[in-house]
Image: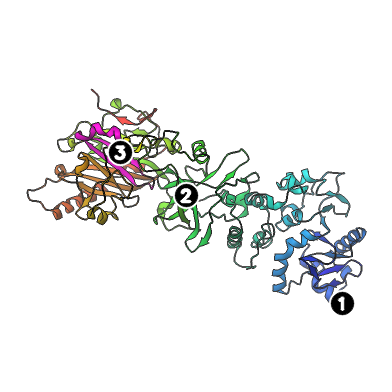
Amino acid sequence: MHLLNVNTLRLEKDVREIHGKAAVEYGILSHRWLPLKDEVLFQDIESHQVNLEQKPGHYKLTQFCKKARRHGLQYVWIDTCCINKMDSTEVQESINSMYRWYENAHTCYVFLKDTTKPGPGRLELGGEEEWFSRGWTLQELIAPKEVRFYDRNWDLIGTRKSLRYSLSDITGIDVSALNGTRKPQEYSIAQRMSWASGRQTTKGEDRSYSLIGLFDVSMPMLYGEGESKAFMRLQEEIIKRSDDRSIFAWKGLSGPHGLLASSPDAFKDCQHMTSVPIRTGNSAYSMTNRGISITTYLSPWTVDTYAAPINCIDGNGKKPRIYLRRLEADDQYARVSVMGKEFNYSNILDRIEDTKDKVHYGIKILPNDNLSRKSSIYVRQARKYTDIHAHYERFHGFRLSGDLPELLPHKHMIETLGLHRWNQKKRTLHFPGWYVLRSFRDLVELTLTNLTKEVDKIKVIKLGFDFDSNPTLFLFESSAIDKRVDFDHSYHKEEHDRTSWLPYVKPSALEVACGNMSVQERHPDDTLGWNKLWEDGAVVLNNPLRFGLWALKGDRIKGLNVKLENTSIQVILTKRETKDGLIWDLNITNLRKASPRRSGEDSSDLAESVESAESAESDEPDESDELTESDESDESYESDGLWQLTESI
């Protein structure tokens, strides 16, 4: 650290420091630079040959020294002439030390070159005053113990404490931080970042470098890396030292994104975003070559998309959650918005997080699923996601195609008993995401009518999703109709009450062999008993333990394409792209009607029939391209309870 002698205007180089502080007291200047040629620089002071008085910056320098002398100070520091900018090592060391130098100064003198003193205790900025919009001046306002403001004539306007309300209005910084009753480190990361939003620097990288002291980190200066990369590195350094998850509370998504922001401007609305400590503590998270590795609770909100808490409270006392969308890799996620909203403020999720007992709300869910699951995931910090599906909104529901629309009742025969919506024209079942915890994993029940002889085997269909967004499909034959009530028991019922007719059976070798296929996944505690597969996953076998119920689970990416054993019924679930997002297309087809099966037809012929039917389905016009969320015609229906399509008597 070099200091300038106020009497001789000569540099005292490499001042001795004791416990990180200069051995002498000094004043420090905060100002806006004149053009470089007009300032008194380090080389000018050292040369002894430059006539300093000829430089416009000389007046500022001498007035600063005069004020410091009046306060009994012999030394001052000013960034124009106390840093040798020809020495890159010294520049880097100075930037990393600057917050500490301002913090340890006796007094900081702020020179507002375009402002005239308006009156005692008031601050009215001049029209060209830039000091409050610059990046470096933020730490110069916050770090020092005492700050004194001077106008263009070097008349005192006031101190940081006396002007605290005006300064707070201008900068957005909390009054308590300005009057010294709270230290900057007592504010959340998001709040401190909000103070830096909107500020500019000559070099884009300096927007980040000027904040390293405010967040008590160190990092090398890499001019030329660009503003966004520098800010990314700053955040990576911050998360190495802090578990404050308000660093994820920014806004400004333009598409799938990582957990870290691209600019301090993304925190402009976070002045009141406080971090909430939890007794169990935040789990550790870190940057890896797969993105940020983090363990968090995930609550399903819409297909492939979850709400994740960030343990913060905003100025309205609400707890925001971010949306994370699962990508093709099962443990890889991206941050997204849902229906144009970047935060989730669900009151139901608030209650679930505030209690260990997730049972009291009587919310209907699939057996062995929780409303929230602690998951270890990666969130990749990528500008562009190669997974195109990450960009699509999700249509939370199903479109019915194939023979199914003909088997459903006409619209005047439909009784709506739930929050789900059936659109007769577009053949879609929609699960409104904002009623997620009442409807997400409820099973939509369809009772078929006008049945053909073959499909008459199936009386009731139940559709839904599991926690991992795999589409689930339950087909009930007549023999299983009376038992489906047991299947529907809510989570608060006793385990044996709701699963007594579905006893757990140890997985067989066949089940283990099929466990990685797209239809099913069997877990040790899974009492549902998903139907087993045969013929390389092309045929679903009957389960003799609960004959008459076909329990099918599609893969969240690959979907489902199977034939039911001893029938000519083919079930296809395909994820389709539409202008309104991705939707699951359900096709239950009578293969015999489409292509009569010959006597003695073997499994290879069957597989060809399945493949042919799927190909034919893919060639059909995609009517879902016309889907719109806003199309609320008289063919959409909703009310309370479970959805059911019933046959008119």
Q: Amino acid at mark 3?
A: Thr
Q: Nearer the viewer, residue 311 or 4?
A: 311
Position of residue 284 measured from the top left corner of the image (x, y, whole percent): 54, 56
Position of residue 519 measured from the top left corner of the image (x, y, whole percent): 28, 50
Q: Amino acid at mark 1?
A: Gln
Q: Nearer the viewer, residue 110 or 538?
A: 538
Give the foreground label among 3 and 2: 3
Tell which circle, 3 or 2, labels the residue nearer the N-terminal end. 2
Can you see residue 176?
A: yes
**Disc sitting over residue 499 in the figure:** 3
Cα distance, mark 1 to mark 2? Answer: 63 Å
Q: Which residues are magenta?
A: 459-486
Secondary structure under the numbered disc 3 in the rendered image: helix
The residue that mark 2 highlights is 324
Q: Amino acid at mark 2?
A: Leu
Position of residue 231 measured from the top left corner of the image (x, y, whole percent): 60, 59
Secondary structure under the numbered disc 2 in the rendered image: strand
The quarter of the picture where residue 488 lies is: top left
